Amino acid sequence: MKTRMFTAKCSQCGHRFRAYTRAGLLSNIREHMWKYHRKWMLARMKAGRLAGTADNPTVGMVLTAIAQGLPVALALIRLLRKPRWDKLEVAVSSFEPYMKPEHREIWQSIKAVKNIDIRRR
């Protein structure tokens, strides 16, 4: 019985890979990328970390918006979808014990509004 051979190509140099399993194929690609395209991989990871935009705010952006006030924070968080909101909520909630009382109130109100907003969608 013949098994299907998985094939792929490196996006940087065009090197071809073949393997009998998907896991093996991905392992080969990952090993090749780190060995021959290390700088590109690191630059890509750095770009992903720095990709904080209005659609994808970082924890620092949210904390700054909370410090600026409720309208600014709501405008920033309103565009988030549930998966990203869940991760961001956990991260910002870890800073909650260190927030000033007025910032903590703003954060609590944002969580309440966002939970209502997510249930509606």
Image: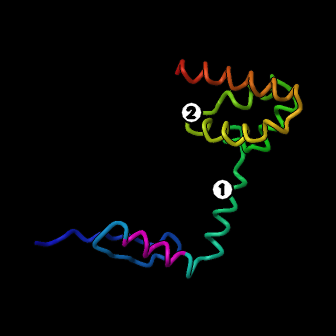
Residue with the most extreme left position: 1
Residue at image location 82% in from the left, 31% down from the top: 66
State how the image is colored: rainbow
- Give coordinates of residue 84: x percent, y percent: 60, 39
State the image quarter where residue 17 is shown: bottom left
Q: Specify the segment rendered in magenta.
A: 24-33
To which residue does mark 2 refer?
Answer: 82
Tell me the amino acid under the disc marked 2: Lys
Q: Nearer the viewer, residue 87 or 39?
A: 87
* Residue depicted at x 64% and y 63%: 44
| Residue 34: x %, y % from top left | 56, 76
Closest to the observer: 53 or 25? Answer: 25
Give x and y (percent) for residue 65.
82, 33
Task: Confirm or deny contact between disc 2 and disc 1 (CB under 8 A).
Answer: no
Quarter assignment of residue 83: top right
Image-based side of 62 in relation to 88, left or right: right
Q: Amino acid at mark 1?
A: Gly
Question: In what element is the residue under mark 1?
Answer: helix
**Could you tell me residue 42's position as x and y percent?**
66, 69
Residue 48: give its label.
1
| Mark 2 neighbour class, 10 Å CA radius: few under 14, some 14 to 19, many 20 or more | some
Q: Which mark is residue 38?
A: none
What is the quadrant of residue 5 in the picture? bottom left
**Is 32 a magenta residue?**
yes
Q: Is residue 52 above or below residue 25?
A: above
Rendered position, 17 above or below 53: below
Report the mark closest to the observer, 2 or 1: 2
The verdict on residue 38 being magenta is no
